[in-house]
Image (cartoon, grey):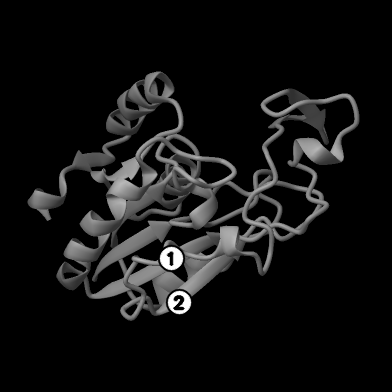
Amino acid sequence: MKTLIIVDAQNDFMPDGSLPVPNGDKIIPVINRIQSKFNLIVASQDWHPQNHISFASNHSEKTVFDVVKIAGENQTLWPDHCVQNTEGAAFHPQLETNRIEAIFRKGADVNIDSYSAFFDNGHLKSTGLAGYLKEKSAKQLYFCGLAADICVYYSIMDAHKEGFECYLIEDAAKPLDNENFEKLKVEMRSKNIKIISSTEI
């Protein structure tokens, strides 16, 4: 079954949001256009409590993009974003959502971040997405969304480890850091993760 995973296409990651991904809004028409090509569509949604450990505002004497150690792991401190039940956490208003069969929320645990749509950053807790996809007999996963070098990347890597055949739709994803994204693409290709254009689906 050909499955589309829409990662975090939320207002706070758009150009006017609190954690803007450059040109993040440009992917919305692409995602809308390709949805009819898939048998199953699911989405992930960043869903943080206001006191989330990844927010710089919750660390005295720290600023946005500082890196701290939390439970022995590096944690980038972000601007407050995708706070539960806020407009910033909502999907982009022009994203077509009628075909989305399930939404998997992540980052709701105050004490740990969750970039991947499959697991938190410590791989302590599953979102249930892998089990859901396997129950649906999904084998080919096509990823799009934001940000390509963070949440999309970590989601693809976890999906690869779970045994799915993975594709990144590059024109339906935008990175926060282009230079880092170029390095990550090399890594993904080395694991036989295919990077394609929406026209190749």
Q: Residue 184 or 93: which is nearer the viewer? A: 93
The answer to whether residue 165 is seen in the rendering is no
Q: Is residue 168 left or right of residue 87?
A: left
Q: Residue furthest left?
A: 199
Classed neighbour count for the residue bearing mark 2: other residues with Cα under 10 Å, few (<14), some (14–19), many (≥20): few
The residue lying at 40 percent from left, 35 percent from top is 22
In the picture, the quarter occupied by the C terminus is: bottom left
Q: Earlier in the sequence, mark 2 or mark 1?
A: 1
In the picture, the quarter occupied by the N terminus is: bottom left
Q: Residue 30 or 74: which is nearer the viewer? A: 30
Position of 96 relative to 12 (above/below): below
- Give the distance between the C-alpha atoms of the residues marked 2 and 1, in whole angstroms: 7 Å
Tell me where residue 89 sits by quadrant.
bottom right
Task: Find residue 139 and report its horizontal and vertical position in percent.
Answer: 29, 63
Q: Is residue 141 left or right of residue 156?
A: left
Position of 110 relative to 103 (above/below): above
Instruction: Name the kind of residue labelled 2 in the image.
Output: Ala
Instruction: Name the kind of residue labelled 1 in the image.
Output: Ala
Q: For mark 1, give the secondary structure.
A: strand
Q: Residue furthest front?
A: 16
Can you identify the residue that label 2 sits on?
Answer: 102
Check whether the beta carbons of the residues at disc 2 and disc 1 lie within 8 A of each other: yes
The residue lying at 30 percent from left, 56 percent from top is 28
Position of 105 relative to 115 (above/below): below
Task: Find residue 136 and report its horizontal and vertical position in percent.
Answer: 36, 78
Task: Find residue 152 and report its horizontal and vertical position in percent.
Answer: 43, 45
The residue lying at 38 percent from left, 44 percent from top is 24
The residue lying at 41 percent from left, 71 percent from top is 134
| Label annotation for residue 43 | 1
Q: For mark 2, give the secondary structure.
A: strand
